[in-house]
Image (spheres, grey):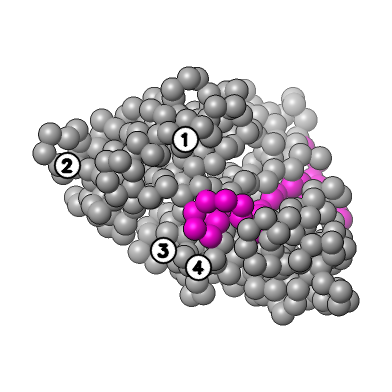
Amino acid sequence: MAALSGSEHRRFVVEAEEDVGALRRAVARMAADRRALRPGVAELVATELGTNLLRHALPGGYVLARQAGDGMELLSVDRGPGTTAAALTVPAGTAPSAGPSRPGGRGLNAGLSVIRRSAAEFEWYSTLNGTVVYARLGAPEPDVHPGWRFGGVNVPLGGDGESGDAWAVTPGECRSPAPTPAPASTVRSGERLHPLRSRPLAALLVDGLGHGPHAAAAAQAAVGAFERVPVTDLDALVRRAHEAMRSTRGGVLGTCLIDPGRGELTYAAVGNITGRVVTGGRSVHLLDRPGTLGTQLPVPSVRLQHCPWEPGSTLLLVSDGIRSGWNLDGHPRLLEQHPAIVAAVVHRDYGRPTDDATVLVVRRAGGMP
């Protein structure tokens, strides 16, 4: 059973020239044991991202970095509007025009071109509220869940160290049989069969109580319970997580099972993990329930919430490190971008500096049923 979880990001503030050097050295250390990375690539991309923040995003911004598979993921985040003075939004994959730069500096287009050539995956999104640049270095993200796209931002308190938050996704199991794929003889030339097209996906976001290594241990215990057994019943999953977290300080979690074949998302939460399912301009709030897992008290009762999952739907789950009342207003076409970019925008605009903060974003690739 292929499961994928996201490690925490390190946050590097870039507001002066010396911050670019510190970013480059830290990224070099993180890249040292990544087998898919060519020597010097991570340092080059980190330098370009940091330099662009200084030149075009006064008063600077920050870079989020994490190891991802055999490579790395880097996200440059700012509040602009240095890169977007001429337009409200620039679609992902569109080369920007050179914006205003400091005397003697290069335009933004030069820096992003270097990053694009060096990255296995590259996207960027910009509005007058700021810019996010996403670069995955090494190999592209493995397609372990065909037909799905997901990504997250998990930033520990203070921007470094272990996070008490964690997220994971894994294939779910539907109770009713999935539709039988079309035989190869009926597929037109150039088409690809997707035998897992209607297979459900399960997602989890967990927040260990407090911060640091003990909170991280609690979160990882819940992730282990989530990954070990196929998810068919969210109530049973919550009970497994409760037992797994008993040897830890405990925590809270939100989990869902998305069944695109039935057009339904089922959600369960214990504690203050919240989320939304967004389809077009409509949004369904996923509600948290009081309680804590892993304590000596009986497992809290679970109340399942059901909502439609339509083509084009996007799931967003957030920990309580994201302020309540978060929304996507002022970010046109944001949900068309890579899920990690969506997560970085929500974290930038609504993250609390006093807590671990995590955003997980899941959607169907290409709006497939």
Of residue 209 and residue 143, the one placed in the foreground of this image is: 209
* Three-letter code, disc 1: Val
Tell me, yes or no, whether the highlighted magenta stretch contains residue 177: yes
The residue indicated by pointer 3 is 349
Can you identify the residue that label 1 sits on? 27
Relative side of 109 to 328, left or right: left
Q: Residue at x 39, y 25 (%)?
A: 117
Residue 297, compared with residue 211, is above or below; it is: below
Classed neighbour count for the residue bearing mark 4: other residues with Cα under 10 Å, few (<14), some (14–19), many (≥20): few
Asked whether residue 105 is drawn in magenta, I would say no
The reply to whether dot 1 and dot 4 touch (C-beta < 8 Å) is no
Q: Rounded to the nearest whole Å, what is the CA distance between mark 1 and mark 3?
A: 25 Å
Outermost residue to the bottom: 290
Residue drawn at x 48%, y 75% as measured from the top left: 325
311 left or right, relative to 262: left
Percent coordinates x, y for residue 96 in the rendering? 27, 39
From the viewer's perspective, is the residue at label 1 or at label 2 nearer?
Answer: 1
Q: Residues within 10 Å of mark 3 (few under 14, many from 20)?
A: some
Decide which of tag 2 and tag 3 comes sooner along the chain: 2
Q: Which residues are magenta?
A: 154-181
Question: Distance of mark 3 from mark 4, alpha carbons?
Answer: 14 Å
Q: Which mark is residue 354?
A: 4
Q: Residue under circle 2?
A: 101
Dot 1 or dot 2, earlier in sequence: 1
What is the three-letter code of the residue carrying label 3?
Asp
Residue 322 visible within the image: yes
How many marks are shown on the rendered structure? 4
Q: Residue furthest left?
A: 103
